[in-house]
Amino acid sequence: MMRLAYKDLRHGLSAFAFGSLGLAVLIFAFLLLIALANAIVTFGEQGGLPQNLIILEQGVLQPEQSRIDPGLVDQVGSLLGQQAARIDPVVFRIMRVEEHPIQLRGVNRAAWRETFDLRLLAGAWPVQDDEVVVGQILADIAGWLPGAAIEIYGRTFRVAGVADGPGTKTQTIWMGYDQASRLFGPDKGAQLLIVHLDPLADPLSARDQLMEGLKPAGRYDAYLEDALIRQYATALQDLRALSVLVAGIAVLAVTLGAHNLGWLAAEERRRLLGGLRALGFGRRAVGQYLLIRALGTTALAYVLALAAAVVFLRWGTDDASLLISGAHSGLTLEWPVALAGLGLSSLATLVGTSLAAGRVLRTTPAMLLGRGPGETTV
Amino acid sequence: MACGILPANRERREDPLTSQSPASPSPSPIIHLDNLTRTYQRGSEEVQALFDLTLTIEKSAFVVVLGPSGSGKSTLLNLLGGIDRPTGGQLQIAGQSLNGLAEHELDQFRRDNIGFVFQFNNLMPNLEAAENVALPLVARGMNWRPALVRAEEQLAALGLSHRRRHRPAELSGGEQQRVALARAVVAEPAIVLADEPTGDLDSQSAAGVLDLMSSLNRQRGVTFVVATHNPGLRPLATMVVSLANGRLHEASSAS
């Protein structure tokens, strides 16, 4: 039967190619949707409670819209006492730098390692006023390596190093607080305060204490670090469910597509299938011929879809990631997803083709051959 | 006819070209029908395609089934070949009752006993001639390689050796039907059923195909049952069966 199916596909190349392309589009959609669903799952998923608190202007969802009074540092220090290891104002902007959406964080350089736990991956920590550090993801995507010159807000800076830290991955440029203040104008001030808690302090009670202490002023909210990202992630769960649902629909469409292709192939070959039955091939053998033929079509479709997905994720987009307010979650095609795609496509083909073949092969060889007058037996 | 129709190195049957003696037909019956009936339902209408047919066909006979369209010729061949089931009566072929056989048993019966030649040959268009001829052997479980060797022997015996690598579309109508005939006999079935085997051929090609069938019948003792409109086939027949409206009109043995 393998030989029959192979010859059939080989000599009907255009039908084979177009059938495969039709399924490939659906499998491609499935692979990308599952990659998107996985990216949503990992977005904002860091685990554990952070030791950092963020203080923002009340009611502001986007940190860059917040404004912090200079006196707030002392007020927070007195509220938390020994629980606060460091309190730093942060200049925070979400902006485009050379076409890349980035988070710019201007914060005291000493806080980079103590508060944000940044580790230097390449180059050196900045020394000069015109030097910055870029996050690893941004360095990878934009190709900004140590020594590169980048223009930010009309001024040229040099990349001194590449760094990475724990927590949600963001496309970040780090510069000193004073540098950032000069860049955007001292009157713009800081957008948020970052409080690094003492390792012995309890983040939740410290946060409650802050909220209570800041309540009379009625101007500020305190969040656990990444809480905003987690809020986005919660909102994205609906999108994840939708992605999985549409991926499921894609699998169903592959099943129906395989069924239609199998049905068409069987109907087109009715007389030939009848001939095979008359020669002594049983229903199972003829069904195997149709299945092998369909699996050949699906195998080609899968290879095309996988190749298209890999090319699209690697080269087809400027940034193969889910990027919200500079927070990053990679869109990647992992082996388990690729194998699941193969398994589900094959299963869908087996089910779809079996249903189609079963409908055709249930009839007698004589009926398949179109011999005799009747349709149904008495 | 001096056409070598047997593949080389065949052991089971005597080669008439070397022995100069045709296989002697056995008088034993190979097909026995007893009140065979086939009724179809077409919408609300009940169609009696074959009614109360009682008939015995001897082994190695060359039976010509005559009758106009709708007389029941194809239905009779379908039932004899086990590709359809009777709705009444008894059907016994090669000592085996076909009544009540399961689907897979009918498949096995066809593999072991029946060769088919169809009007439109039903060759697989994407397979070469030799591959088409090898199909009944593959259906019996033989591997492709030895099956192709035997198929090529059979094609050579029918004078089609030079066409073994051609696909059906590259063959003439007569050649296609000769390939179909090679396919029908390659597994050495006891019975070959041919439904209008020359209906789609010109007279010269038709004569060639009929010669081959006649030779196979005489040399190898294969029982042929040939359904046709064409009364010109009577001279080839050892038995003529005439059908009209699904009933036996005439059954006569010829010399």
Image: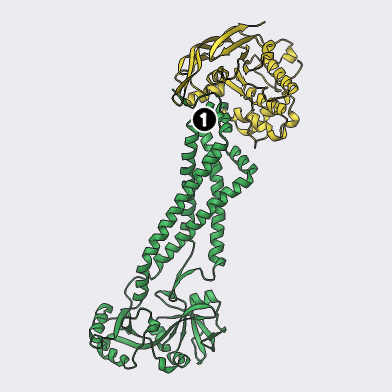
Chain colours: A green, B yellow
* Quarter of the figure with the N terminus of chain B: top right
Q: Which of A20 and B28 is in front in this view?
A: A20
Measuring from the top left, give residue A365's x and y in whole percent.
53, 27
Q: Mark 1 points at which residue?
A: A282
- Indicate the quadrant where residue B125 lies: top right
Q: Which of A274 and A110 is in front in this view?
A: A274
Tell me if residue A99 comes above or below residue B242 in the rendering.
Answer: below
Q: How crowded is mark 1: few (under 14 residues within 10 Å), some or many (20 or more)?
A: many
Q: Which residue corresponds to the image point at 49% horizontal and 57% vertical from the top-left?
A: A29
Q: Nearer the viewer, residue A257 or B167?
A: A257
Q: Which residue corresponds to the image point at 63% horizontal and 40% vertical from the top-left?
A: A7
- Indicate the quadrant where residue A305 lies: bottom right
Q: Which chain carries label 1?
A: A
Q: In what element is the residue under mark 1?
A: loop
Measuring from the top left, give residue B88's x and y in whole percent.
45, 15
Is A68 placed left or right of B10 in the picture? left
Q: Which of B224 and B26 is in front in this view?
A: B224
Tell me if residue A261 comes above or below residue B53 in the rendering.
Answer: below
Tell me if residue A74 comes above or below residue B188 in the rendering.
Answer: below
User: Mark 1 belongs to which amino acid?
Assistant: Gly
Q: Which residue corresponds to the image point at 54% horizontal and 78% vertical from the top-left?
A: A99
- Indicate the quadrant where residue B43 lies: top left
Q: Is residue B2 visible?
A: yes
